[in-house]
Amino acid sequence: MGTKDRKHSNSDGDSLFRAAVEDVKPLAVRKRHELSRKPSAAARAKPKAPELQPDGIFASDMAGQTTEPGEELTFRRDSISLATMRDLKRGKVPRKEALDLHGMTSTEAQDALREFISFARSNRFRCVRVVHGKGLGSGNRGAVLKTRVNHWLRQYPEVLAFCSARPAEGGTGAVYILLKTR
């Protein structure tokens, strides 16, 4: 048998496929789900005296940084005692406001976080909570906002420490943030 005799034709396969899918209709395009809950007044408020970080604060490379959905976040500067960190982790430091980043793009979340931290500092809040989500709805992209919030918060000199929240307040889908009060 020569190679010409073994040549395969796709015409039979193509016609079978077309016959199999001739009654198929495309799915309707779903619009992005809008949040039913409005952001808190703190999240919407413009800071009185904005202390925005210089351009490029978030420009450092995040390549290779990923955070797992159930992973606990923790960070503290050397100036924060282990006892203070323990109180923060136990939820014993009173929190004044919260920001929910669910449903935001990375750019929206970054802007909202920057404004929220500036607002909290201008109001002398020592501790706040940010809900970033666990990343379970991100599919194979992993915990996108969680990873970025973990990275962004470390960039702010006014963030003294942060850790994952207690389960009743979001668990590994939220963080308590300890801020400089000036």
Image (cartoon, helix red, strand yellow):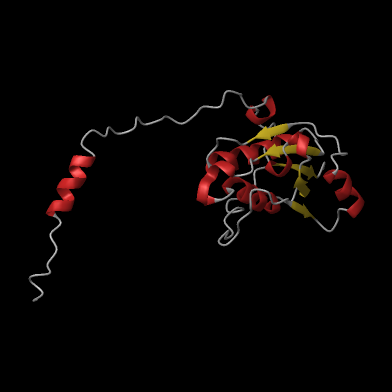
Closer to the camera in the image, 179 or 13: 13
Image spot of residue 75 (x, y percent):
76, 54
Quadrant occupied by the N terminus: bottom left
Q: Quadrant of residue 178?
A: top right
Q: Quadrant of residue 40?
A: top right
Quadrant occupied by the C terminus: top right
Q: Residue shown at 68%/36% (left/top)? A: 116
Q: Residue shown at 86%/56% (left/top)? A: 79
Image spot of residue 103 (x, y percent):
55, 35
Q: Quadrant of residue 45?
A: top right
**Residue 28 in the figure: left or right of residue 54:** left
Image spot of residue 120 (x, y percent):
74, 35
Q: Residue shown at 84%/59% (left/top)? A: 78
Q: Is residue 33 visible?
A: yes
Q: Is residue 121 visible?
A: no
Q: Is residue 15 above or below residue 50?
A: below
Q: How many marks?
A: 0
Closer to the camera in the image, 176 or 72: 72
**Residue 96 in the figure: left or right of residue 154:** right
Q: Is residue 36 above or below residue 104?
A: above
Closer to the camera in the image, 122 or 95: 95
Q: Point out the residue furthest to the bottom here.
A: 2
Q: Residue shown at 52%/40% (left/top)? A: 105
Image spot of residue 84 (x, y percent):
89, 48
Q: Point out the residue furthest to the right here.
A: 83
